[in-house]
């Protein structure tokens, strides 16, 4: 008997105990059953064996660093960080992953900060390294250097995927239509890099409200970090103060020194704003916001009705003109 047959006399640990022999002794059925049993056991052993062990090698240990992990370790990532990074976009080649991580490290980000950025925006791994490098250069030319650049990309990783025309349109709006100086533009982008992600039309409305409606100049806007406050919050606080007689819109060419500073209006928490500036209660402010939202809805409906009426009148005039010309 072979060694495999001797091992299977008492049963196989993978296949279970050997079947009991027939009462008449071993026969053709018993021999065939043993052969099938040997084949089945060998197949299961082959399936249970690791692939590398079947080829003569040793099975890899959990957490062992391969060539891809070695490159990340050389860049300063720990074994745990390298494992987490390899888990992002698994189908992506290790070269692309290492190149993206290297570009973020060149910006001055630490290993953990770069990993966190890629975890929040794994699509950056699919960008060509040249695009990451080029966009970083464009942001530097806008004045985002050193720590400002690191904070900007950490807060807004979408800056790497933002179309170039869109970013150029926002910069052109801030310089040519909002008339911010180059130094003021650097300060705006440094304190609120998300402004580059805004729609130019909405951004222009934000600026126009502060400039024309509130009478605030560019210098004060920069100091108050205007664009970090949502437009709805800016409008709510301003109109609330205005209706309580605590804010007066300056006329053209005049300066109102009695108005609260824009920085105080925007930076104070809501409780402090109501207590120190508006001298009101949270309940009153909440009712005011509801009424203001209702007013805006009614104004929108009236505007839609006017547009529909004007359209009907234009159609009637066109019809009468055509009829007269025909006669």
Image: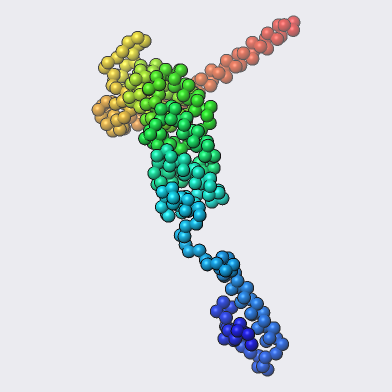
Q: Residue at x 35, y 24 (%)?
A: 222
* Rendered image quadrant of residue 264: top left
Check the image and report above or below for 59 versus 181: below
* Rendered image quadrant of residue 205: top left
Check the image and report above or below for 319 versus 43: above
The one nearer the camera, 156 or 256, is: 156
Q: Can residue 208 be seen?
A: no
Q: Decide if residue 145 is on the left or right side of residue 325.
A: left
Q: Residue furthest front?
A: 74
Q: Residue at x 59, y 78 (%)?
A: 15
Q: Position of residue 3 (x, y in %)?
A: 60, 84
Q: Position of residue 307 (x, y in %)?
A: 55, 18
The one nearer the camera, 220 or 215, is: 220
Q: Position of residue 270 (x, y in %)?
A: 31, 32
Q: Residue at x 67, y 79 (%)?
A: 36
Q: Residue furthest bottom?
A: 24
Q: Position of residue 42 (x, y in %)?
A: 62, 75
């Amino acid at each position: 008997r072979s060694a495999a047959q001797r091992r299977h006399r008492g049963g196989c640990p993978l296949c279970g105990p050997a079947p009991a022999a027939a009462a008449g002794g071993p026969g053709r059925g018993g021999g065939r059953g043993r052969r099938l049993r040997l084949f089945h056991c060998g197949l299961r052993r082959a399936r249970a064996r690791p692939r590398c062990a079947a080829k003569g090698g040793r099975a890899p240990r959990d957490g062992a660093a391969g060539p891809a992990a070695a490159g990340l370790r050389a860049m300063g990532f720990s074994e745990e960080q390298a494992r987490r990074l390899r888990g992002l976009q698994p189908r992506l080649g290790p070269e692309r992953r290492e190149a993206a991580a290297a570009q973020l490290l060149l910006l001055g980000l630490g290993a953990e900060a770069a990993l966190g950025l890629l975890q929040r925006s794994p699509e950056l791994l699919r960008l060509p390294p040249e695009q990451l490098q080029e966009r970083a250069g464009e942001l530097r030319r806008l004045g985002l250097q050193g720590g400002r650049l690191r904070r900007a990309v950490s807060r807004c990783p979408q800056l790497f995927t933002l179309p170039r025309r869109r970013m150029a349109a926002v910069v052109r709006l801030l310089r040519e239509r909002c008339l911010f100086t180059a130094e003021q533009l650097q300060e705006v982008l440094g304190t609120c890099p998300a402004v580059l992600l805004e729609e130019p039309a909405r951004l222009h409305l934000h600026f126009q409200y502060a400039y024309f409606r509130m009478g605030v100049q560019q210098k004060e806007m920069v100091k108050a970090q205007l664009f970090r406050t949502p437009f709805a919050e800016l409008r709510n606080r301003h109109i609330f103060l205005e209706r309580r007689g605590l804010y007066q819109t300056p006329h053209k060419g005049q300066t109102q020194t009695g108005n609260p500073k824009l920085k105080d209006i925007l930076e104070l928490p809501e409780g402090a704003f109501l207590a120190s500036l508006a001298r009101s209660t949270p309940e009153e402010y909440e009712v005011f916001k509801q009424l203001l939202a209702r007013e805006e809805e009614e104004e929108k409906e009236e505007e839609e009705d006017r547009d529909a009426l004007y359209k009907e009148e234009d159609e009637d005039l066109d019809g009468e003109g055509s009829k007269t010309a025909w006669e």
